[in-house]
Structure formats: C-alpha cells, structure tokens
C-alpha cells in the first residue's frame, strides 16, 4: 500500500523536483499539494504547484492555497535564489488546472480527520506556517499524523539566509516551534544533508538525456538554480534540498542521522530561526526529531533520474 502524503510547499525549483519525484513514485500517494508563502508570495507558489502537476501529467491532483504570511513576522522571500517567478529558468505555460476553493489549512485538518489515524504523513518543503496553523486550529488532528518529514534547519552547515538560520525555519520560527513541540515523529532533512545532494554537471546531463519534457525542465531548473550556489559556496552545483524529503519516503536507507532534541530559536534577533540540535547529546532534553546528517548522493541521484524518467 502506498504511503499517503500531503506535500506542503513553496515552489521553488527544488520543491518542483520533489513534487515530480512524488508523482512519479508508486510508493507514495499524494492526497493533495498545499502551497504556502515562502520562496515567493502565495499567489506564485500556488501557480507554480499547478504548473508542476501539469508537467507531470497530473492535472487531477488537488492543489490548495494555504497561508499567505508567517504567524508573526513579515514574509521573507528568496527571489535571489529562485528568480522572480520562483520557478525561473525554462519558460513554462500558465497552468489551466484549478486551485481548490477550500483553504489549504482546512484541507490538512479535514484529511487528517477523515483518513485512519496514523496513516497520513506530512511533507513540508517550505516554511511551516500551514502545518502549525492546522495544529493550532484543530489540536485533535496532531495525534492523527503518522510522521512529519520536512526540509529545514541545519547543524554543521548552520545558516543559508542568516549566519545562524536555514531559510524555511527562519521565515516562520514560531510555526517551526509549534511543529517541533508537537510530539509527533519528525524526520528532518537539514542543510547538512542537502548540501551533499549536489547537482554536478554529469547529474544534470543525465536528466537532460532522458529526452522527455520533465527531464529537460529539471535540467533547466537546476541550470538556473545552480548559479547562486556555485557563486556563493564555490560548489560544483546546487543542493537539491526538497527532493530529499520524498527520496527518504521511498528509500530511507539512503539517509543516516541521529535521534536528537531540536529546539527552535524564536527570541534572539541575531540567531532567530536557528535549529538548536543537540547532536552530541550534551543536554538531557528529550529527543524529538530524527535529524539527518548524511546521504548516499549517488543513490539519491540514481533514484531521482530513474523516477523522473518515468514521467
Ligand atoms: C529551502 O529553502 C528554499 O529556498 C528551498 O526550496 C528549500 O526548501 C532551503 O533552505
Ligand atoms: Ca522549498
């Protein structure tokens, strides 16, 4: 039986690849895609989510608009990484599939209430605003979540939007705090992992060589997305952050990490959004998250290329 998932996302080229991976994989059943404000404002992330579903040949997927701003702070966006549209790179047609009328947060709540308890996994690929809002609005649904597998945070790599914080957590640290204190099983793909999942030239060429429209789009998105990381980090390519979440659901053995305590800094101006992960178990704070540290990058890209090739 495929694992039922809700993808909560702010596409973003790497979010887009994650959605394609999920839609290409029989191990997961995508119950819905919920957009959140993050890399770009909500109207664009909602549009981009639909563009990606159509690219995958799945206009039947339900796409919802969620929250348009973080719980307490002004929205911080990342056009400097993803471009003005959030999906800069190849020219994409406007989507023709609809946005669902229901608010994305209500979809999350309703789905968790209607599916059997412990059967739905939440996959946040952006700021945690929608998930935290659902948990606050309907506390009864929290216990019904099977697992939360998210991209966010960092320990060894520390920060990419500030010296101390990773983007998804920084944009809405209050939401992240609610999620990390939820008591549900959490698996985290931090920058420590995603900065090892780099799009080197041969990996990008493998996508292009698929000879399909999705393969070409993935190659062109990564071409665009790479320029930022190559300049900033001097790395061989760009980290494909968000697909790590979906790859973990399909091939968990590709990843390794530690079950540790993770607290979110919400107060300090200097370190707001930092994921304070007790990697070395130097406190007696109870572990609340499986914090990944490593990935078999070859295995990850082999999986990704093979699956994108199915679309
Ligand atoms: C995260 O921030 C976004 O820019 C990416 O889509 C990813 O989810 C990486 O810090
Ligand atoms: Ca994202």
Image (cartoon, helix red, strand yellow):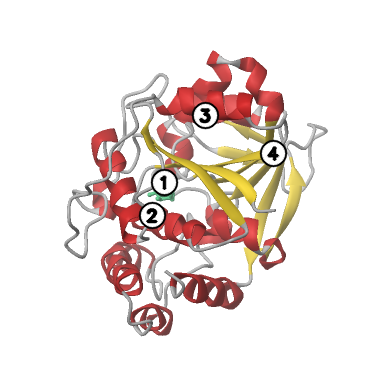
Q: CA distance from mark 1 to mark 4?
A: 19 Å
Q: Secondary structure at mark 3?
A: helix
Quadrant for the C terminus in the image: bottom left
Q: Mark 1 or mark 4: name the one nearer the start of the chain.
A: 1
Residue 87 position (above or below residue 274): below
- Is residue 100 rendered to the left or right of residue 198? left
In primary-sequence order, the first of circles 2 and 4 is 2
**Which is nearer the N-term, disc 1 or disc 3?**
1
Residue contact between numbered discs 1 and 2, judged by CB atoms under 8 Å:
yes
Callout 4: helix, strand or loop? loop
Q: Secondary structure at mark 1?
A: loop
Q: Residue at x 54, y 24 (%)?
A: 110
Residue named by callout 4: 119
Residue 53's x, y, as percent? 36, 53
Q: Looking at the image, which is closer to me, 260 or 185?
A: 185
Question: Which residue is label 3 attached to?
Answer: 108
Q: Earlier in the sequence, mark 2 or mark 3?
A: 2
> Residue drawn at (30%, 42%), measured in percent from left and top?
45
Question: Which mark is drawn over residue 306?
Answer: none
Mark 2–mark 3 contact, CB under 8 Å? no
Label 1 sits on residue: 61
Q: Is mark 2 within 8 Å of ligand 2?
A: no
Q: How far is the residue under mark 3 from the one under mark 4?
A: 13 Å
């Amino acid at each position: 039986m495929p694992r039922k998932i809700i993808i909560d996302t702010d596409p973003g080229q790497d979010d887009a690849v994650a959605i394609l991976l999920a839609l290409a994989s029989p191990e997961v059943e995508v119950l819905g895609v919920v957009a959140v404000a993050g890399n770009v404002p909500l109207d664009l992330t909602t549009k981009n989510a639909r563009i990606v579903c159509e690219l995958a040949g799945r206009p039947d997927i339900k796409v919802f608009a969620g929250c348009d701003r973080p719980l307490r702070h002004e929205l911080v966006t990342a056009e400097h990484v993803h471009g003005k549209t959030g999906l800069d790179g190849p020219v994409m047609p406007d989507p023709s599939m609809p946005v669902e009328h229901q608010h994305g947060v209500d979809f999350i709540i309703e789905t968790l209430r209607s599916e059997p308890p412990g059967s739905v996994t939440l996959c946040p690929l952006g700021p945690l605003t929608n998930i935290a809002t659902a948990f606050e609005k309907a506390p009864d649904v929290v216990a019904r979540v099977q697992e939360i597998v998210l991209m966010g945070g960092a320990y060894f790599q520390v920060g990419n939007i500030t010296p101390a914080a990773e983007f998804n957590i920084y944009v809405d640290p209050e939401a992240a705090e609610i999620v990390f204190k939820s008591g549900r099983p959490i698996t985290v793909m931090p920058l420590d992992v995603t900065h090892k999942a780099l799009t080197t030239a041969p990996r990008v060429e493998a996508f292009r060589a698929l000879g399909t429209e999705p393969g070409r789009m993935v190659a062109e998105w990564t071409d665009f997305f790479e320029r930022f990381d190559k300049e900033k980090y001097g790395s061989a390519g760009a980290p494909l952050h968000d697909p790590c979440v979906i790859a973990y659901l399909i091939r968990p053995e590709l990843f390794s990490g530690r079950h540790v305590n993770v607290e979110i800094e919400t107060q300090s101006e200097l370190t707001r959004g930092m994921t304070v992960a007790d990697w070395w178990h130097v406190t007696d704070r109870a572990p609340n998250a499986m914090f990944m540290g490593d990935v078999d990058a070859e295995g990850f890209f082999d999986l990704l290329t093979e699956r994108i090739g199915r679309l």
